[in-house]
Image (spheres, rainbow, N blue to C red):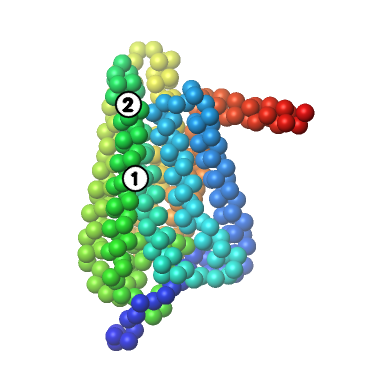
Amino acid sequence: MGSENYTQISEFALLGISEDPRVQPLLYGLFLSMYLLTLLGNLLIVLATVSDCRLHTPMYFFLSNLSLVDICFTSTTVPKMLLNLQTHSRAISYAGCIAQMYFFIFFIDLDIFLLTVMAYDRFVAICHPLHYTIIMSPRLCVLLVLIFWVVNVLYSLLQSLMVLPLSFCTHVEIPHFFCELNQVVRSACSDTFLNDVLMYFATFLLVCCPLTGILHSYSKIISSICKINSAQGKYKAFSTCASHLSVVSLFYCTLLGVYLSSAVTQNPHLSATASVMYTVVTPMLNPFIYSLRNQDIKRALKRLFDMKSLKGQLYGD
């Protein structure tokens, strides 16, 4: 390929999930509904945990952070996709693509770290209940979240900066509905060896290691639950971590399923469609999983709505 085909391009083309124009209105309505549900559900979780002093505990502190991150996570990809569907455009600027990639990496890794520390929180609560308040102190919880933010800021910046030196052909089509790092790197015309090494190393360090920590925590939790004599005690202990276990299973199964299937099938459009599961569906379902199985959240939401209705009556009078 001649050197004239290499240039600092100004934009990429996002092929999206489907190029069939008849499907576009259906996709727009579907993703708009899911996005609004994600915003509403996660915002309610944040408001419930902040407004109710009974939920000012480490578990709900991490849950509110997870809901906030899920709002930001979906907001990095879905609004641009909705705009492209509405305007029948596939273009995203070079700077916009790099920015979207940066924030996507940042928030997905925050999701992973928060799910990991929530598993550790449940491990301490069930396996070391007498030392829970000492180990999971408010200072430690805040410190962990701050560390996660700083680490992810630096890591996302590193990945984004590693893309900047790459050369691209004059017309680059990304078979995805957002600028996913792997797809962008594959679209480069220059050598991507260092990018591939960094991606594989980061996948092991930031995905496999947290997953190992989660599995280890739950192995200890299950072992402790099995030692409880009463059935009621076992149910109570399991119910405290059932919601988190459901969210972890949904997130990791969809995430790993997408990347394993893409490695086997080599079908980018299928990979883009499957990515909807962990980028859109999982953040939308998380608040429903926590609220449906958690009596504390249900009571907090009920008090929140009762307080709003009472204020409305007072101001109405």
Q: Amino acid at mark 2?
A: Met
Front residue of 96/196: it is 96
* Residue 254 on image: x %, y %: 41, 48
Tell me the residue at 31%/57% (across/down): 157
**SS class, disc 1:** helix
Relative placement, left or right, of 16 versus 222 is: right
Numbered badge on residue 32? none
- Report the quarter where the N terminus lies: bottom left
Q: CA distance from mark 1 to mark 2?
A: 19 Å
Residue 278 lies, with reference to residue 231, above or below; the image says: below
Q: Residue furthest top?
A: 230
- Residue at 50% in and 36% down: 46
Given the image, on which type of amino acid does mark 1 rest?
Answer: Trp
Look at the picture and state if 150 lies above or below 262. above
Q: Say above or below: 70 vs 304.
A: below
Report helix, strand or loop for mark 2: loop
Q: Which residue is mark 2?
A: 136
**Relative horizontal placement of residue 303, taking residue 10 as reference (left or right):** right
Residue at position x 26%, y 53% in the image? 202
The x and y percentages for residue 117 are: 33, 35
Residue 225: which quarter of the image? Answer: top left
Residue identifier under label 1:
149
Give percent across and percent down for residue 146. 33, 40
Q: Residues within 10 Å of mark 1 (few under 14, many from 20)?
A: some
- Which quadrant: the C terminus? top right
Mark earlier in primary sequence (1, 2) = 2
Image quarter of residue 243: top left
Q: How many marks?
A: 2
Residue drawn at (29%, 53%) of the image: 155
Can residue 311 be seen here? The reply is yes
> Where residue 234 sits in the image (x, y, percent)?
39, 18
Would you say residue 211 is visible in this rendering? no
